[in-house]
Every structure is written in structure tokens, then in C-alpha cells.
Amino acid sequence: MLEDNWTGTSTVPSRGLYPHQWSWDSAFIAIGLRHLSPLRAQTELETLLAAQWDDGRIPHIVFNPSVPLDAYFPSPDFWRSSTAGRAAGAPRTVQTSGIVQPPVHALAAWLVHCSDPGLSRARGFLTRMYPRLAAWHRYLLHRRDLGGGSLASVVHPWEQGMDNSPCWDLPLSRVTPAPARSFRRADLDHGSAQDRPTDLDYGRYVRLATDYRDGEYRDGLDGRQGGGRSEFAVEDPSFNALLIASEHALARIAQELGATGTARHARAERLTAALIDRLWDPAEGMFFSRDVRGGGLIPERSVSGLIPLLLPTLPRDIVEALVRTAASKHFGLGGTTRLVPSYDLLGEAFDPHRYWRGPAWFNTGWLVERGLRTHGERGRADALRRAVLDIADTSGFAEYVDPYTGEACGATGFGWTAALTLDLLH
Ligand code: 9WN
């Protein structure tokens, strides 16, 4: 599958539905590819980072110029990166989107390096990646600290990666949707309408992206710098936990390159404290997203709120509470579900087939498995690993599955499903 999805310089998530390069997909794909070809894994990340903007952002899509414009929406003529993104330093030679995705990249670069340190050193892989990854983290921690509490905010549901999660229903309800006739969804040519976000969701996605583009992708705080005040701004646990895990990885990269890495580890610790301070709810035993514009935590249980389990220095009481919540009736780990659902089984909006409103995804399964193993929960981690391997196989390496039955939903032959399966086999 990874061979089939390889374009020569990167890997598409899916030939039909997603025919370009996606940011966090590429990071997960590189983590799997390193077992097949460390060189290809390095190339995957190098191609993505070559499209980085001067302000440090890594765009969520790098467009393949040989793919027809109508194959995916929104296409390059919507984002207009080389004109609307000029002030923010978008590249001139390649077309990209203007929003971002979760920062899994430094973690991926470190794991790719570890798979073949000799090749990595000979090619100067980390030497070339380090300044780009450092600029990426700087962008998120400075330009995107919209809540003023040291965490990064996302300004579009596509940035967090779990597009139609019920967590966004409240903040999105304040956004006036773009009229349905003003755009054409290409996703419905490939996926079932029942499994995908609704037209109303899409209207709001388009409105937010249009406004960001028309403000030239500025991230000014409260619009003081002219434009850039997104109606949607959310601090999300998974996005920030991945940033912290990547900051620890960046510290290891710095050490490999001869520095101490101490300052970066210390920064990761401060961010972990901020994550707990701003997003942890001790009464519910999980992390929640914070609605920066509306104020307050969003009371929806998402798998995103379990992913901080990944962090090695999370206090023991929080680890224990997260494990209990994962095994509770809300997520059914080791009980009613085969794989961790993306959303609360008991939540009003739960739907076992609709995208991020209930189905289980393999990247989140991989992250929870890694978190359980990090904290010595070996039995649960082994069981989850076996379930991921089994269901990836029986579902045809599906994009996502019904969390109870493992039935395939969305695309099959999906990039990160194949890559992360490979990683769990090693
Ligand atoms: C929008 C590529 C991406 C994933 C996201 C997933 C989906 C895109 C879409 O596909 O989002 O970015 O068109 O639905 O939600 O996590 O990176 O696989």
C-alpha cells in the first residue's frame, strides 16, 4: 500500500480521496516507512518541510501540480498561497494550503533518524531538519498562543485533524456558513455522504478558511495587527500533547547535534504544566478542549482528551485517571469496543460511522497504545496493539472503522493505517 501511494517524493493518504501530501499523515507515514526504507522516510519529511513558510508554519497540504484541480476541494486556486500567503512567506515554487496540522514532525524525524543513524548522519538529515522544526515550534508557541496561556490554538477544525468532532459544534455554531452553492465538494465523489462531514459543516469550514485567506493568513492577537482574529480558536489537548512530545524529540535531536537539549526539555515540562493547568478536568478524569473565543472548557469527551497519555512526565494520578476513563463506558477500551472510539460512546452526538464523531482511527489507536506502554500499562497496550493489527488487516487498511465491529468506513488502502501497522509489527 505504501508503494502504491508513493509519488516519488512523498506518500498520498489515499489515491482517490486525498491525492496530495498531508502534513500529519506524512509524519505518521514516515514513522512506518522507516522500517521499509529509511531513505524514503527521510525524503517524505524533507519534501513536506521544503514547503514550509518563512513564518515557520508547515502547511497542512502540499499540492501535487500534476493532479487535476477538481480532484480535491479546496484546491490550490482556493488557498492562493503564493499570493495571499506572500506576506507570511509562503513558498513561490509550490502551492500549499495556509492552515496547519498537528506537530508530529519532530517526533517523526527523531524516530526516522533512530532507524538508521549512519544514513541519517551521512545525509546530514537532522542538521537540515533541526532549524526548520525549531521554526515550526516557534511559530506555534508564539504566533498561535491566542489564549495567552502558553498553549497553541488551532483556528480551523482541519488544523486539529479531527475535522467534525462534536468538540467543535459549539465554537462552530458562531460561524456563518458559506452558501452551499459557492463551492463543490469533491470528497463525495469518493466517500459515502453518511460517513463524511455534513454540508453545513463544510459551509463553516469554507467560511473560516476564506476569512483566514482574505486576512492574508495573519495570526495577529485580537486583530491588533490588522486582520487575523479568527472567530474559531481552540486549545486542544491532542494538538498540544503532540507539540510537547515533539519538543522532547527536538531536545534529543539537539543533543545528537552536540547541544545539551536541556532548555527544550525544560520548555516541554513548562508546556506540560500549562496543559494540565488549562485543559485537565480532575472531576471528569480527562483533558478537554478550551474554547478561546467563547471561554471555558468544551464539555465533550473526545479521544483527543486521552492522547496526553503520551507524555512521559505526566503525574501518576493523571495517568491513572486517564487509563480509568479509557476503560470506562465512555470509551470501552478492553471492554465494549474493539478500538478506541474518536468520541464518547454515550455522547449525544455519537455516530459509529460518521468520521470523527465516533469511529475508531488507527493513528489515535497508535498514540494511545504508545501512551499506555510509556506508563507501564503493558497488558492493555498489548491488547490494543493486537486489535489494531487485526482490524487493519481485516478492514483492508481502512481510513477508520466502526469501533464496535471493526467494519471499514471511508477510504481503504489508507497511508497511515498501513504505516502505523508496520510500525507496530517492529
Ligand atoms: C481535510 C488526510 C486528512 C487527515 C485528516 C482527516 C481528513 C481532510 C478532509 O483527511 O481531513 O484536511 O478532506 O477531510 O480528517 O485528519 O489528515 O488523510
Image: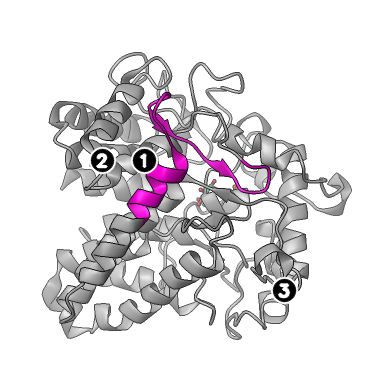
- Residue at position x 40%, y 14% from top? 329
| Residue 307: mark in rendering | 1
Label 3 to label 2, Cα distance in Å? 38 Å
Q: Which residue is mark 3?
A: 216
Circles 1, 2 touching at the beta carbon (< 8 Å): yes
**For marks 1 and 3 on the same chain, the one whose residue lies earlier in the sequence:** 3
**Mark 1 residue CB less than 8 A from any atom of ligand 1:** no
Whether residue 341 is situated above or below residue 77 in the rendered picture: above
Asked whether, in this view, residue 412 is left or right of residue 127, the answer is right
The colour mode here is one colour
Nearest the eye: 110 or 40? 110
The spot of residue 77 in percent (x, y) is: 74, 70
- Residue at position x 67%, y 48% from top? 293
Asked whether, in this view, residue 72 is left or right of residue 398, the answer is right
Nearest the eye: 333 or 46? 333
Amino acid type at circle 3 is Glu
Amino acid type at circle 1 is Ile
Task: Judge whether residue 108 can be spotted in this image.
Answer: no
| Residue 371: mark in rendering | 2
Asked whether, in this view, residue 388 is left or right of residue 186, the answer is left
- Residue at position x 55%, y 55% from top? 153
Label 1 to label 2, Cα distance in Å? 7 Å
The spot of residue 39 in percent (x, y) is: 25, 72
Label 1 to label 3, Cα distance in Å? 32 Å
Amino acid type at circle 2 is Gly
Q: Which residues are magenta?
A: 271-295
The spot of residue 222 in percent (x, y) is: 70, 63
Q: Residues within 10 Å of mark 1 (few under 14, many from 20)?
A: many
In magenta stretch: residue 281 = yes
Task: Judge whether residue 23 can be spotted in this image.
Answer: yes
Circles 3, 2 touching at the beta carbon (< 8 Å): no
